[in-house]
Image: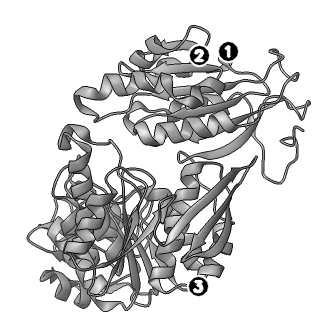
Amino acid sequence: MTLWTSAEAAAATGGRATSEWTATGVSIDTRTLQPGDLFVALKDVRDGHDFVAQALEQGAAAALVSDVPDGVAEDAPLLIVPDVLEGLEALGIAARARTEARVVAITGSVGKTSTKEMLRAVLSDQGRTHASVASYNNHWGVPLTLARMPADTEYAVIEIGMSNPGEIAPLAKMARPHVAMITTVAPAHLEAFGRIEGIAVEKASILEGLEYGGTAVLNNDCSTAAILQAKAHDMKRRDIGFGEHGFDFKLKSVDLQRETTVVQAEAHEAPLLFKIGAVGQHYAMNGLGALASAEALGADLALAAQSLGRWSPYQGRGAREVISLDPIEADMTLELIDDSYNANPTSMGAALAVLAAAEVTHDIGRVSKGRRIAFLGDMKELGPDGPAMHADLAALDAMERIDRVHCIGPLMKHLHDALPAEKQGIWAETSEEMATQVARRLDSGDVVLAKGSLSMKLALVVDAIRKMGHPVDKGEDPQDKN
């Protein structure tokens, strides 16, 4: 299906098309580019203009550039604009303008991507749905997501993130959502904001992009809920509250089972029961907010609750998998919780609570007692309080049920030193070092969590755990250890 013609793209950007072409997608990376994509030559760590020739060789329909790159013919299919990022933004704005889709935008310190994926799942069962890929939520990710949106989209889910003040409002105004959801406000990016109240003000600025008559879906449980509500009031926008203190979607109880979370809630004082294919109190909260957002978009709430039961997180975001350690003995397995994509104190606490609630299996490994084991990497961008925030993890209630904690990075050294001796694992400067120690620290029957900020590369530890054996397919049954 045609996404952009050369004439449409030129009109949207004010650029000059060197020839006629049609694009079926938009890409910024030759590694994932598909034939028919419009390649956008962004300048970031590397200059995308250096890859235009390669993109065209791989079948790109055209390239969005600010000049004709070396090695590219003058008559090559190009769209030439003064500034490539501004050109991408213009494409995004035009794509948003031409669709009648109902749009939801999501921000928050924790849970943006998981909630976005929940909404993608529930809305896809009710109409043609377009959503951000991975965590494409920044100054180029949002316009890229919009530029990729087909004109006949019925629901769109746009994730919006930030690292510094003033970043969210312009992106929200570009997305023009009918519903804006804030998952929560927590200490993250404190280096840039100083205090959590500053983070709340920035998160609340997503409401500045709301369409007239739009709805704010707000977490009523976070400590800065009043700031979020005040912004909605100032903007004269309807707000829906969710959480244990939710005004409209009230969380009543959460039952963490072996592979699912069962949630009892109320929606406008009517009973609402749903389940999620992942374990965690935080999934219950995100799911409740997702259902509130879906209803605010006009989707069917009962159908959305059913759809949510089929959702589960993906790698790096809390996905759970069973690793078989013995090709003969089917019950020689351990369970991996891969939450390695990112971390801040709130999400770290949530992940440790999931680990603490996990069921271990005894008498099947070298060590007779199954254990709950964590590999934790530094949480970045916490400012001067960062060392104390790491040490404070030792006092979490969840730590009482966790048997061993291995720490990675200079900040996690503070947690390592604060742990009681019986829980103190090893400390390593880097994940590369820790990955060499993984196999000797784990055994059959264990449940193991890996979590840290993305730059800490906890994925290396996750890979080392997987290489101890092989993942067990969902259809296999050696996982049933009871």
Rendered view: 346 above or below 232: above
Q: Is residue 481 left or right of residue 250?
A: right
| Discs 2, 1 touching: Cβ within 8 Å | yes
- For disc 2, the marked residue is 437
Tell me the mark number nearer the camera, choosing from 1 and 3. 3
Q: Residues within 10 Å of mark 1 (few under 14, many from 20)?
A: few
Colour theme: one colour
Q: Is residue 119 visible?
A: no
Residue type highlighted by circle 3: Asp
From the image, state whether disc 3 or disc 2 is nearer to you: 3
Indicate the amino acid at tag 1.
Answer: Arg
Q: Residue at x 57, y 76 (%)?
A: 269
Find residue 353 and report its horizontal and vertical position in percent: 59, 38
Horizontally, residue 92 falls left or right of residue 294, namely left
Disc 3 secondary structure class: loop
The residue labelled by disc 3 is 300
Q: Position of residue 311 (x, y in %)?
A: 64, 63
- State the residue in front, 316 or 86: 316
SS for callout 1: helix
